[in-house]
Amino acid sequence: MSLAMDRMSTAVGTFAVHDVRAVLPGRVLDGAVVVCENGVITEVKEGGAAPVGAVDGRGSLLIPGIVDVHSDALEVEVNPRPGTSFPIDFALGAFEARVRAAGVTTVFHGVGFYDTGGGRHTGRTLEQARSVCAVLRIRMESGRAGVAHHVLHRMDVRSPLALDVLLECLPEQAPGVPAPMVSVEDHTPGQGQFRDIDRFVAARAAEQPGKSREEIEKLVRDRITGRDALLVNRDRNVERLGDLAASGRIRLLAHDVVSAEEIADVRTRGACVAEFPTTLEAARAAREAGMPVVMGAPNVLRGGSHSGNIGARDVAAAGLVDALASDYAPPALLAAAIRLAADGVLALTEAVGLVTAGPARTAGLLDRGTIAPGQRGDLVLVDDSGRWPEVLLVQTAN
């Protein structure tokens, strides 16, 4: 499909598109006209006159801007290979172009607050966490950001120092602004996401073909031993984070939850979101506890978890997913939503909601995620006629 990509408007601050299939809450509006003024949607209607200069959608799909509540892709831009790195501000510019091309208009960067080694992720240090948060803040304050940037503070719960640095990096509280999100994480092999030690060892061996199985097993054992020595920090950090959540200072996410018992425990400790539950039992318990459930979009496309845990498609089919996150692959978000709808797992409106309204609500951002008057004018025009969806145009409120 050929479509003019230029932003055409009748006046400064005005954007309009017509002849689109607009995905609204609960229905798809054919032949729709959508108008934005100064970054806010002002009109959504079926047919009728459109402003002069409105973009002709030619029957394409129009969805709200995609909201990504967990992206680790900036880490890859900064540290593309072991031992190599780019300036963070340069990497951020490249990242913006990539995610806009994927239809993402709001992104929560997973910034790792680790001082015990990030395993494969050598860039996860407290110093880099400070630097990334500072660069993101400067970018947003510049008024030139191509997308809305936020931080998902990924807290290693066994770390003796990470929480203090995380508190330094938390944005100032402001009226009407949602509390910053903090994910409580423990990636020690043998529990959580990596319960299956054999699978974990096999994955590390595939990444390091020059090492023998015995060498990899020793590295894993040493990592477990080292992490076990840090258990004393876990209860202290969990208690402090719980207090912060109870006061409304942070929005606490429980990462890689395994069971109903664990859901009950994290709920009492202040967690309000279940991020990447590893079993259907945990996902169901989270839903019953009123906790939004976040699953991985790459998991949907690949047909299962790379760690051998529950497949996101199965959790979605059970009606237990509130939001999909890109994790490490931003283009997977739109593709996963369209695939879930094409395969009949979910209705199109529900599937699109998993990458728009659902994650926006999960993050407490109530001003975006739907095409409706009063919402932010973050819009994405999509050609869904091929095997994989193609982003044709991205319009953002900023």
Image (cartoon, grey):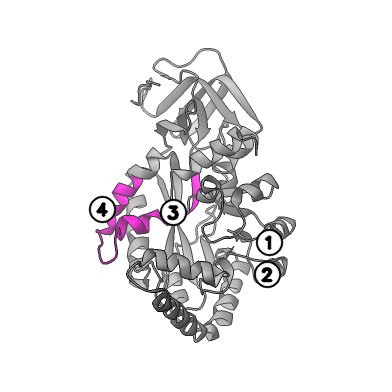
Q: Which mark is residue 262?
A: 2
Tell whether label 3 touches label 2 (CB within 8 Å): no
Q: Secondary structure at mark 3?
A: loop
Q: Position of residue 306 (x, y in %)?
A: 51, 57
Q: Earlier in the sequence, mark 4 or mark 1?
A: 4
Tell whether label 4 touches label 3 (CB within 8 Å): no
Residue at the disc numbered 1: 282
* Foreground pick, 61 / 269: 61
Disc 1 from disc 2: Cα separation:
8 Å
Q: Which mark is residue 90?
A: 4
Mark 1 Cα shell of 10 Å, populated few (<14), some (14-19), many (≥20): many
Residue at screen point 57% across, 36% down: 370
Front: mark 4 or 1 = 1
Q: Position of residue 345 (x, y in %)?
A: 65, 39
Residue at screen point 60% across, 45% down: 358
- Range of magenta residues: 67-96
Q: Is residue 215 left or right of residue 174?
A: left
Residue at the disc numbered 3: 328
Disc 2 from disc 3: Cα separation:
26 Å
Q: Secondary structure at mark 4?
A: helix
Taking the image as drawn, is residue 117 in sight? yes
